[in-house]
Image (cartoon, rainbow, N blue to C red):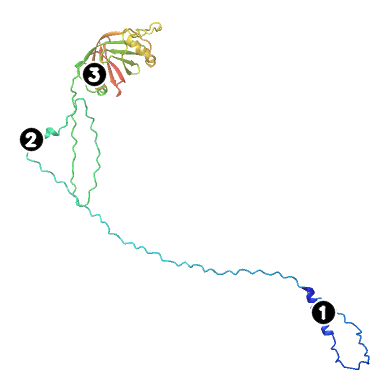
Amino acid sequence: MRQTCIAICLLFLLAACAETPPDTVIVPTLAELPTLTPSATPTVTATPSPTLSATPTLSATPTLSATPTATLSQTPRPTVTVTPSATITDTPSPTFTASPTPEANLGSLAQLALTAAAATVLPPTLRPPVATPILLDTPAPIAGTPVVATTFTPLPIAPVACPWSLPEALNSLLAGDPGLSTALGCPSGTPAHFAGAAQMFQNGMMYYLDGAPRTIYVLTIDGRYHRFDDTWVQGVDPDSGGEIPPPGLIEPIRGFGKVWRQNPDVRASLGWAITNELGDTATVQYFERGRAIYLPVRGETVILAEDPNGQTGVWRTVSGGF
């Protein structure tokens, strides 16, 4: 490209410098015309042309077309209209006042029959509890309602007599301790008689009753007793455990010995026996919650007031029998 431009420039310069040729004259052939010799040849001086540097071609930039933006139209929300419902009015119901029921004019026999039917008969073995006053809240009067004043008169509770009477001697023995009588309750039948036995220990005693079932009572000096069934069988169980007691003391045998050996707490509580067994016919009075045992050979009555479990309780002795 550059060389082409230089060549074109030289051609223009040469054309400008060339002289216009003279008009041609026809002369006779014999005449010899002098030849015109150019004296100097014009020197073409190359004028440097400005160098064209390659200009980077800009690539076409893609034209971004404007995309129309969707216009969100605001849709009005529906207005919720609250329609008030009908108001429920609590209309007070009329209060009915009970009118006293007129009593029929009944005969004396009919009145007596109604009174007997309304009476409550207590079982013979139950004692009524001591009357406890109950405080009742007085309701507040309601406006517009007449208030009828009512007076409550407590009825006295008559003591219920026990169906069975105690022997006079036993009644006299218990008269000195009303608390013991209350703990025992009413007597259950009349006194019974069984073969019995007793044995004294260092710290208490044992009583045996040949009833149904055969029973052994262990009485310790702390005023407590424990009841055991007599399971000793003659010819099956040994009479003795072969214990060697300290001097002056005795090993219990047979039924007493079996309970004593098989229950370490009984042995620890009673210690060794200090007398042999004393047998006699025992008189027993049963109560709702205990019993009284009179063994003539001992000359005293043992009173046993049992706990609710029937196996344990408290005991005391009173002189004499019944």
User: Earlier along the polypeptide chain: callout 3 or callout 2?
Assistant: 2
- Circle number at residue 136: none
Q: Residue furthest top?
A: 247
For the question of whether residue 198 can be seen, the reply is yes
Q: Is residue 234 above or below residue 186?
A: above
**Left or right of residue 312, residue 24 in this image:** right
Secondary structure under the numbered disc 2 in the rendered image:
helix
CA gap, disc 2 and disc 1: 168 Å
Q: Which residue is nearer to you in this view: 143 or 252?
A: 252
The residue lying at 38 percent from left, 16 percent from top is 265
Q: Which residue is mark 2?
A: 110
Q: Which residue is nearer to you in this view: 245 or 212?
A: 212
Q: Residue furthest front?
A: 29
User: Earlier along the polypeptide chain: callout 3 or callout 1?
Assistant: 1
**Left or right of residue 208, residue 20 in this image:** right
Few, some or many residues within 10 Å of mark 3 (<14, 14–19, 20+): some
Where residue 261 appears, x then y in whole percent?
37, 12
For the residue marked with disc 2, what is the amino acid? Answer: Ala
Which quadrant: the N terminus? bottom right
Q: Which residue is nearer to you in this view: 230 or 73?
A: 73
Q: Which residue is mark 1?
A: 10
Secondary structure under the numbered disc 3 in the rendered image:
strand
Secondary structure under the numbered disc 1 in the rendered image:
helix
For the residue marked with disc 3, what is the amino acid? Answer: Tyr
- Circle number at residue 286: 3
Where residue 78 appears, x then y in whole percent?
38, 64
For the residue marked with disc 1, what is the amino acid? Answer: Leu
* Residues at discs 3 and 2 in contact (Cβ within 8 Å): no
Q: Looking at the rendering, which quadrant does residue 230 occupy? A: top left
The residue lying at 7 percent from left, 35 percent from top is 110
User: Earlier along the polypeptide chain: callout 2 or callout 1?
Assistant: 1
